[in-house]
Each structure stands twice: as structure tokens, then as C-alpha cells.
Amino acid sequence: MRQRTSGPSDRPPPTRHRPRVAALAARVLCVLVVAATAGCASLASPTAEVGADRMTDPRPVRDGGTLAIALKSDPDKLDPSLASTAVGRTVFAAMCEKLYDVDARDRFVPQLAAAPPTTSDGGRTVTIRLRHGVRFADGTRMDAKAVKTSLDRHRTLPGSVRASELKPVTSVQAVGDDTVRLRLKKPYVPLLALLADRAGMVMSPTALKRYGNGFASHPTCVGPFRYAERVVGDRIVLDKDPNYYDADSVHLRRVIYRTITDGNVRLANLQSGDIQVGDQMDPVQVGRALTEPGLQLFNSPSLGYYGLTLNIGNTEGAGAPPGRIDTPIARDVRVREAFDLSLDRALINTIVFQDRYRPTCGPLPSGTPYATGARCPARDLAKAKRLLKAAKVTTPVRVRLQISTTPEDNRLGQVIQAMAKEAGFAVSLAPTEFATGLEHSRAGDFQAATTNWSGRLDPAGNIDVFAGTGGAQNYGGLSDPAIDRLIAEGGATAGKAARQKIYARLVERIRAQHTVLYLIQPTNYVSVTKKVAGLKVFGDGLIRVKDAGYATGGN
Amino acid sequence: MSYPIRRVGESLITLFLVSVVVFAGVRALPGDTATALAGEEPTPEAIAQIRASYGLDDNLVVQYVRYVRHAATGDLGVSSRTGLPVLDSVLEALPVTLELSALALLLAVVVGVGAGVVAAVRRGKPEEWLVNAVALLGLSVPAFWLGIVLVLAFAIALPVFAASGFVPFGVDPMENLRHMVLPVIVLGSGLAAVVMRQTRAAMLGSLSADYVRTARAKGLSSRQVIMGHALRNSLVTVVTVLGLQLGHLISGAVVTEQIFVLPGFGKLTIDAVFSRDYAMVQGVVLFTSAAYILVNLLVDLAYSVIDPRIRLGGAQ
């Protein structure tokens, strides 16, 4: 028998010692003393190094067991058409497979498709062959008609967040049982990246028919695990799916995603054994986890970035034509360049992120084929002051910086404030809660704002909507015909070498405008108990549990 | 108008006012629900579609009438964030908060009354100083700090209790207790300190009263005097204080649920406010208010049955 079938408590019990009462009392006393001074812990220097990228643990695993994974926030709707949170993608990774996926080297690989897509008609027709013998969690057969139903739903369902992503697709056609053909308005190379994300997720047509708009209560897809229950704000439970085409290689019996927003509480739960995996650990917790003998760390370079957006023309809201903003930083690119030159990215990384991330100055992540490899300009206060003088602005130039209310953003804001002051800027910080901050950014009601983007594998996903005129997330109101032309060229050009050249020029052009100041490329950090192996954490930051399980032969 | 009908009418008016205040209050929050829902990729098209599909384009009166019409049939709507029925989430969260509050109240009564009696009986002795010091600590220590210390001590150093989460009592009673002990201590400790101080003060008054002296003179044992006479009379004050502290218990539960990641009402409400989940916030507050108003109504009606003067008061 491959699986154990015991109840929820079949996770291995945390290691328990039975020391004598006196020893226990001493231990508790020590802990209380440490706890009383816990406020100083975050300022301590890291005592261990993270090391090179580590995306999995290859030790063999046994069948059975429940894995509890702590997520940083509660996912939104478990409906691939309507979902919009990054954390929701992690849950989908276990229960809703896509036509394509990414591998450890950030390459696209077929998942529910049988092979890479083929294009014809000058790139306007994309043909996808599907994997044979695949069934949804409810037993329905996954065929071309099911894929067409899902893609059409993504494109047309009211409120679908996928509709705009799939805008270039004009029609979807089921050709026989195992082939799907997509017709496009114009060649659109980033489509493959979209089909490797939620737009490529296929839902059971039986479940869609049965539950309609209530699909989020009964998400039914193809995946190693199937939906069991959800308690809002607390947990999402998935059970191993016997209908899965590769069920024999799935080891865990159950996966529970728990929402634990506070990083310290996530770490405490890891230490206590109540959870086995902590997702999105921030640098402070990583430093503390490194000294824990029972924990291991997975880390992969993120596809996203931390940055600053300066508002130079968003007067009517993102997406609307840019207007005129009469502030020094909006008027004159030299003032923006001076602001950029006042910042020391390496020092920001050290102070704010404990040196656990990487300085960057472009939107394309290092390690991916389109990374430009350009060196970031060093901090140059003399040049910054010269630029401000040339721009004939009165110093200090006042800038109101909108930051989120997280401790990390607070530190980032304070460091930027201190650095910019030396060049002649007076930065005031405006901590703003997430939903309000998003609304201000969209409406253009800000001068400068911190940005945190989770990232996409195709370069278009990190650039187009942020830098293109009328882009949905072009909160700074940047409008440059040369940038728009290069964006269009990048989307329509096939071939890696040709695209690399286009995106290198595009990034240079964006950087020259100093509207989005790219600062840091984060790292995906996932802390895991050493009892667990086989987990995978790739560049997209998703935790893949298909091959995970409890390690055989002890730790 | 008869008393029961008048009270029911008053309750309905109160409920109506609560629904208006909550409806308006949630919408007065800065930030747009459609933008928040569109998440990382808030395209104008997606925002417009979300706005249309949740009826956010309609004016506030239309939205309010639609909401009340549905609520009257028991339909509290669907969470704009999770797509799940609000009523389901409310009914899942309710037992968690009820259990947490009830156990914290129990802890406060048992520990607070016991310590208060000891402090009064042993007045001027080391026991009183110790109890007073511990009570002062219970009042002074912030809940979040106490929570962190308890987790470090009793979930990590000594893995006896769970650091967070909830297991329903019906699923596994032992696991339920393992998860509830630390939150109950955090929530109950402050209240226990208040109860202890009130019990001590009331007991000191009772112990110097004439009826206690008479009881002693009659030859009753110390235990009979303290438990049967002094404490019994002091409990009136304690019960009054407990009633006044119930509001603090509920607000304390919100903080405790955040610290220990308990999926109760507090956590549900805070998550909903931060994600501008109008339907969820309205549902939770309306449900709580309706329950509160209903309990008050039933109590008043019960009073009127027990004491006819209450229902006849208006006719005098």
C-alpha cells in the first residue's frame, strides 16, 4: 500500500524531549529573558550565510503525511479567471495545472500541453497539442473542448482578471479531441508566459456548469491535489487527487495552506512544529531561521523588484492620457536623475534587507535570458548636486514619498529619506495602508511611491503595463513614443536573440527617463523543516508540492 | 401599545440604524474596493468589470436597499475577496470567538475571584502583596507581548501548546485545548486582574460588615463565613463588573485572534476591513449586532414576565 490513511494528526509529531523539571524551568527562564529583550533581535547581525541558490532537497521521501504551509496573506478567490493575488498562485500550483509551466532554469515547459506551441500564419495562429488521458479532480476528461471552455471563460466572464491578458486572442477552436487552436489579432510572443500562469489554467467544464459563479467554492481542476475545504482567513485544505495523471509520484496525503501574516509568528510556528513550510520569509526571519538546527532554507532569485515610482504625468488616473504636473521632480528629468544618483542601492540592500537581496537598476531579473547585465550607476552626490543646480530648482526639493505600512517599507523609506537629503531633497514619508495606497497610485494622487512587483518570466510582464503609455500600472504617467514602439516590437518579435536586443534598448530608454527607479531584486526565501524533502521553489516564487514528502531515514 | 410589541419595534429600529451606520461607515473608508480586488494587475477593464459585477456603480441608496432586501432573507451576500458566502464564514468564525471568550471569562472568574478572596482574607500578609503584584502585572503587560513570551516559552522551548491555529473541539478535544490554552491566558489575564481587584475590595467591605461579625459570633467556621456570607454578597459587585468588562473581552479577542491566528470574528473583521470586503464587514457587524439586540430583547421580555411592573410601567 502506497499511502497511509490516518487522520489529520498523522504529521510526524514535533520532536519532544523529556528533560527534568529543573532543566525545563531553567530553559523557560532563559526563554523569558530572551523574550523580554526580543525587541533587539531584529537589529542583530546575521550569524550565518544563505549560500547559493537552492531550489529543492533531493532526499528520497516516504508516502503519506500532511504538510502545513504558512502563507504570508490570505488568497483571494480560488477561481483562475477571477484570482488576482500572488499568494493565490501558490495554492493553484498544487491543484490547478496550466497548459505550460516554468522549470528550475526559468524555461517554459509543457504541463497540460503535450509539447511547445507551434505558430503559423505569421504568428497569428497558435496551435497547442494536449496531454492524453488526463482527468479533472471530478473525473471529467480533459480534452480540447474543456480547454476551449476555460479559455473562453477567462476571456469573457464578467470581472475576469484574465480578460485583458488574453485580449490579443480573438478566438479559440477545439480541433479534434487533443488539439486547441488560438487565433490572435497580431503576433503576441508573451502569450506563452500567460499560458504558463492563471490564463493557462484549465477548469472542469462539469464543475463550471454545476457551480457557475460559485466555482471559487468548489475549484475543480487537474492537479496532484484537489480542493477539500476552506476556512476564510485560516486554512485551505487540499487532498491527494487519485484522478491525477501522475498520482503514483505524489507522496503527501494532504496539504494545508494556513494564513499567517506576521513573519515572526510564521517562524515561531516553524520552530514549534505546527507548520512545516514558511513561505515568503523576510530577511530578518531568514537570519533567525539560519541558526535553527531543525530548519533548512530554499532560495531562488525572484522575478520581481522593489523600486520607486515618480509621478511625472498621472493626473487623470493610470490608463488615461498623461497630463502636466508642476513639480520639480515631474518637470525636469535632471531632478529625477539627481534623486536616482542620491541613492546607494548596495547600502539600501544592507540596511533594509540585511544583504539578503540583490541591488538592481532594471526591471528584468538577473539570471533570466533577457537580463541586460548593465551595471548600476554608483551613488554620486556631486553629480546629483550639479544636476539640481543646472535644473535651477530651489533646494531642498520637497518630495512626498508614499510607503506602505510594513516594517520593511518603513525602513526603506527612512533610508531613502536620509540618502536623498544629502543631495538636496527633503523627503517626507507618507505611510499608507495597502488598499488606500493602491487607490492613490492609480488615481495619480502621489509624488513618489514605493513599488513591489512579484514579477513575470517574460520581459513584457515586467515592463509593458508599467512603462507603456496608458499602461494599466503606469502609475507615474510615463509616455514616450520610443518606449511604446519598443514595447510593441518586443511583443511581436519571436527569437531570443532579437528580443534580447530589443529589451536591452527598452530598458536603457526606461532608465533614462528616471520615472521608475529600480532598486532591489528580492530573493524568494522559503524556510522548511528538515523533515521535509522534495519541495521545489523556482524563480516564480511558487512552492511546488507535487514531489514533496517526509524524508525517509530521518533527518 | 403593548410592551412586547414596543420592545420589538425598538429593536428593529436599532437594527436599522446599525445597518445604516455600518453601511455608510464601511464606504467612508479610504481606498476603493474594486482596485483592491483587482490585486496585482488592476487594469481599468478589470476594475470596471468588478465594479459592475458587485453593483458598486449603483448609487448608495440602491446598494443599501439591495443589501437590506437580501439580508432580510438571511442572505448576507458573497465575499468580494474570496467569492464565498458571507454567512458561511460568519458561522465558521462564531464558535471560535465564543469558545475563546467563554474560556477567558471562566479563567478570569476562577483565578480572579480566588485570588481576590485570598488577598482580602490574608490582608497585610505576603500573600496579599504577591496577589497584588501579579494582578498589577496582568493589568500592565500588553497582550501582544504576553502572547509572544508564552509562545516562546510554551510552544517553542517547551512544545506543550500550539503556537497558533484552531482545531474544533468536536474534531479533536485534546488538540482544541492545546490550541486554546495560550490565547485564553492572554485574553483572560487582564480580566482576571480586574476581577481580582474588585473581589478583594468587595470582600474587604463584607468582612468588616456587621452580618459577618454576627456570623462569626454565632460560631460559624471561618470557611462558612467567608464562602457562605462574605463572598456571596461580594459577588454582586463582581458580576456587575464582569458585565461591564464584556466589551473589553470582545475587543481583546480581536487582538488575541491576530496574535494566535485564530479564525474568529476579530480576524475575519480585520481582514475584511483591510481588503475593503464590504459584504463581509457588514455581515459580521450586522450579525453581531442582531445577536446582541436579540439577547437584550429576550432578557427584557423575560423581565416583563417575571416582574409585571416593567411591562405596566408605561401605563402608570
Image (cartoon, coloured by chain):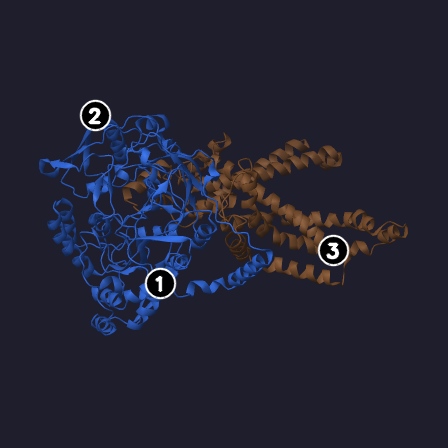
Q: Chain of mark 2?
A: A
Q: Position of residue B120 (x, y in %)?
A: 75, 57
Q: Amino acid at mark 2?
A: Asp
Q: Chain of mark 3?
A: B
Q: CA distance from mark 3 to mark 1?
A: 52 Å
Could you say whether the residue bearing mark 3 is in a helix, strand or loop? helix
Could you say whether the residue bearing mark 2 is in a helix, strand or loop? loop
Q: Which mark is residue A50?
A: none
Q: Chain of mark 1?
A: A
Horizontal side of A550 relative to A35 (left or right) equals left
Q: CA distance from mark 2 to mark 1?
A: 53 Å
Q: Amino acid at mark 1?
A: Gln
Q: Position of residue B315 (x, y in %)?
A: 73, 35
Residue B121's quadrant in the figure? bottom right
Residue that label 2 marks: A177
Chain A, chosen colour in render: blue
Q: Amino acid at mark 3?
A: Val
Residue that label 3 marks: B118
Chain B, chosen colour in render: brown
Q: CA distance from mark 3 to mark 2?
A: 81 Å
Could you say whether the residue bearing mark 1 is in a helix, strand or loop? loop
Of residues B18 and A453, the one nearer the viewer is A453
The residue sitting at the left extreme is: A122
Residue that label 1 marks: A354
Horizontal side of B246 relative to A530 (left or right) equals right
